[in-house]
Amino acid sequence: MINDRVPERPLVSVVFSFRNERQNIPTLIARLDAMFSRAGVDYELLFVNDSSNDGSLETLHTLNGTATAIGRTLIAILENHQRADGSVEIPEHLWQYLPDRARVLRPKQPVA
């Protein structure tokens, strides 16, 4: 027998073909993640690029962390943009991805 074991949680695979959907992809992924999480379902999303030229593929790479090595990018930002007071100013070209309050990260104040 190959494998009689029944998975503890169902696995769903969803395949999307997309073309020029850069603005819609983040919302789609967030909504599907919320739905599958509430339902207790493990899932995978498979995206097939149909010749997008609006940055859709780059958006997908950014969302799943394959565009850059996230850990190394974070370390580089911390090392190169930390101020004397311990705060970190996020580079301006990244602001579009962050809420306004996250443009400068400040260390937590110690509890007295």
Image (cartoon, rainbow, N blue to C red):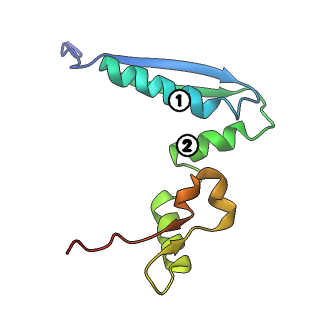
Residue holding disc 2: 63
Q: Please state the horizontal and vertical placement of residue 10, each as a whole percent of the image.
A: 30, 16
User: Is 2 rendered above or below residue 77?
Assistant: above
Give the residue type at disc 2: Leu
Residue holding disc 1: 29
Residue nearest the viewer, comparing 48 with 65: 65
Q: Secondary structure at mark 1?
A: helix
10 sits to left or right of 34: left
Q: Please state the horizontal and vertical placement of residue 52, each as a whole percent of the image.
A: 77, 32
47 sits to left or right of 8: right
Q: Please state the horizontal and vertical placement of residue 91, each as a whole percent of the image.
A: 63, 68
Crowding near pointer 2: few (<14 within 10 Å), some, many (20+)?
few
**What residue sits 56% from the left and 19% below the top?**
15
> Quick check: can you spot residue 68?
no
Please identify the residue farthest to the front as the structure is shown. 112
33 sits to left or right of 80: left
**What residue sits 50% from the left and 30% below the top?**
30
Q: Please state the horizontal and vertical placement of residue 104, each as a whole percent of the image.
A: 53, 68
Numbered-mark total: 2
Residue nearest the viewer, comparing 24 with 50: 24
Dot 2 and dot 1 residues touching (CB under 8 Å): yes
Q: Secondary structure at mark 2?
A: helix
**What residue sits 51% from the left and 18% below the top?**
14
Task: Name the disc covering residue 101, or none.
Answer: none
Give the residue type at disc 1: Ile
Q: What is the distance, in whole Å, between disc 2 and disc 1 at their CAs?
A: 9 Å
**What residue sits 72% from the left and 29% below the top?**
21
Residue nearest the viewer, comparing 39 with 68: 39
Quarter holding the C terminus is bottom left
Quarter holding the N terminus is top left
Q: Name the image quarter holding residue 86.
A: bottom left
Q: Name the image quarter holding residue 4.
A: top left
